[in-house]
Image (spheres, helix red, strand yellow):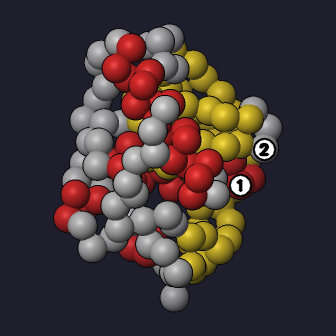
Amino acid sequence: MARLTIIKQDNPLIRKTSKTVDDFSPRLHEILDNMYETLLHANGMGLAAVQVGILYRMAIILTEEYGVIEIINPIIKTAKNQRIDTEGCLSCPGISGRVRRPHFLILEYQDRNGAKQTRTFHNMDAVCCCHEIDHMNGILFIDKLEK
């Protein structure tokens, strides 16, 4: 495995919309493994592929309830129980702020082998999923800061 470089908020690539993953080959597994190592090294909670310059709809999230989750091509089916919490981002070092996000989420996604999954996420796990999905759409948490 290798550590990847996390791009920062001033890199225009971070604002790009990611593409759907349709190739679940060993190359994808290698990218996910490298993202996981990068996330652990950075002491983060989540990492979207776009944050390491890969424009595909996938992320790694360290959840409290399920452990490590790889979400590929996620679709939010239900989002509710909005609350405001403080967030930060590996692509926005030194910046934090309060963002309104759902604390209950039902998410459909694919795993690294392309199998469809549906899971329910609560509290900070739900927040982290939404944060990473925003990255896939070119949105940073700083775009959603509460006034």
Q: How many marks?
A: 2
Q: Nearer the viewer, residue 12 or 145?
A: 12
- Which element is circle 2 on? loop
Residue contact at pointers 1 and 2, CB within 8 angstroms: yes
Residue that sits furthest to the front in the current view: 2
Q: Residues within 10 Å of mark 2 (few under 14, many from 20)?
A: few
User: What crowding class fits label 1: few (fewer than 14 Cα within 10 Å), some (14-19), or many (20 or more)?
Assistant: some
Q: Residue at x 29, y 42 (%)?
A: 54
Q: Is residue 25 above or below residue 100?
A: above
Look at mark 2 in the image and give the residue it sits on.
Answer: 64
Query: Distance of mark 1 from mark 2, alpha carbons?
Result: 8 Å
* Residue at 25% over, 35% down: 19
Q: Residue at x 39, y 73 (%)?
A: 143
| Residue 61 spot, x, y in % from top left | 60, 42
**Is 20 left or right of 100, judged from the image as shown?**
left
Which label's residue is closer to the chain start, 1 or 2? 2
Residue at 22 percent across and 57 percent down: it is 13
Of all residues, the one furthest to the bottom in this rendering is: 147
Name the residue beneath numbered marker 1.
Answer: 124
* Mark 1: secondary structure: helix
Q: Position of residue 133 (x, y in %)?
A: 45, 47
Residue type (three-letter) at the residue carrying disc 1: Met
The label on residue 45 is none
Location of residue 38 in the rendering, given as x and y in whole percent from the top left corner: 51, 47
